Image (cartoon, coloured by chain):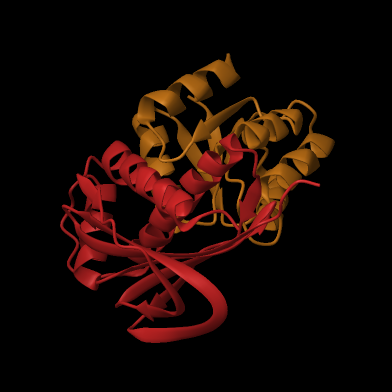
Amino acid sequence: MAKIMIVDDAAFMRKVIKQMLMELGHEIVAEAANGVEAITIYERIKPDLITLDITMPEMNGIEVAKELRKINPKVLIIMCSAMGQKTMIIEAIQAGAKDFVVKPIQKDRLHTAVSKALS
Amino acid sequence: MKSVQHLHHVVSKVGADVLLGYLGLNDHAHAQRELSFQVVNKEVSVIIQMVGQLGGQVILSMEKATAREIVSSMMGGAVVQELDDLAWSAIQEFANWFVSAMAIEFSDQGYDFDIAHPIVNEGRSILHSDQTYILVPLESSCGKFEIYSSIKWREAG
């Protein structure tokens, strides 16, 4: 079981991801609706893993991933975005994401990504 | 600007991908294509801006009954009586899936763009613009949608 923070500007997606992760036995220790909030909460809570949306107000997920890597180079990030173009996936991985899950999220796919990142 | 037929093809394909592939809903893209300087919004419209090698705006417009059916499908069949904050968020996300699927399709054709946070308009209205919109009506088992697209391609130099 991991302590996970969910970062997504859509309340609906935070609820969906939270439900999936809890069903997989993980604990949701924090939620953030934008990148700035995510960085502030991360520094305080230091979760084991973060699911991170890309298209968000204030600061997009790619920028957030780069900032989080400055704070902790070993931070575990899984990008969750509908913007699944090859260029976007490459950019996310280069920014430090361990995996990229394309929305709408399938529970099995999320489970695989989380397990792989934590192993 | 690329042809109206080309955009119609992309919207139709994306409609099938999102409605059938993501939500398990049958869909049908009407052949009708209209060029208009007006967007006639139904009860619920979601507006998404695109910026990049391809720029413009996509508007998904539908009646509230259709929106409730879509949210219900997204929530695994839960009954949706009214559009509360969570339902509005789901409708925004649905539009996000739709335009993101367009982004993937166009990216495969060499045009990359980012999308902005979706904006929801509740209530019927008419949007007047100096931009030309292409209207592609889609029909699904959830109800009818109208997809208005105003897109400019920036040819690679």
In the displayed structure, does residue A73 sit left or right of residue A81? right
Is residue B118 shown above or below B78? below
Work out which residue is located at the far right of the displayed protein and give it.
A70
Left or right relative to A65: residue B88:
left
Image coordinates of residue B155 in percent, x first then y, are: 72, 50
Q: In this view, does A83 lie above or below B1?
A: above
Up the image or down, B111 lies above or below B141; here it is above
Q: In which quarter of the image is residue A104?
A: top left
- What residue do we see at 45% from left, 28% from top? A110
Q: Can I make out residue B83 in this image? A: yes
The residue lying at 65 percent from left, 45 percent from top is: B112
Foreground: B9 or A109? B9
Quarter holding the C terminus of chain A is top right
Locate residue B46, reporting x and y percent: 43, 68
> Which chain does red denote in the image?
B
Q: Nearer the viewer, residue A68 or A86?
A: A86
| Residue at 64% from the left image edge and 52% from the top image edge | B114
Image coordinates for residue A6, horizontal then vertical, percent: 54, 44
Tell me the residue at 49%/35% (across/down). A102
Say whether residue A13 is visible: no
* Left or right position of A59 against A30: right
Residue B68 position by quadrant:
bottom left
What number of labels is visible?
Answer: 0
Report whether B116 appears left or right of A111: right
Q: Position of residue A89 (x, y in %)?
A: 63, 32
Closest to the observer, A47 or B120? B120
**Tint applied to chain A in the drawing:** orange
Q: Residue at the top extreme?
A: A119
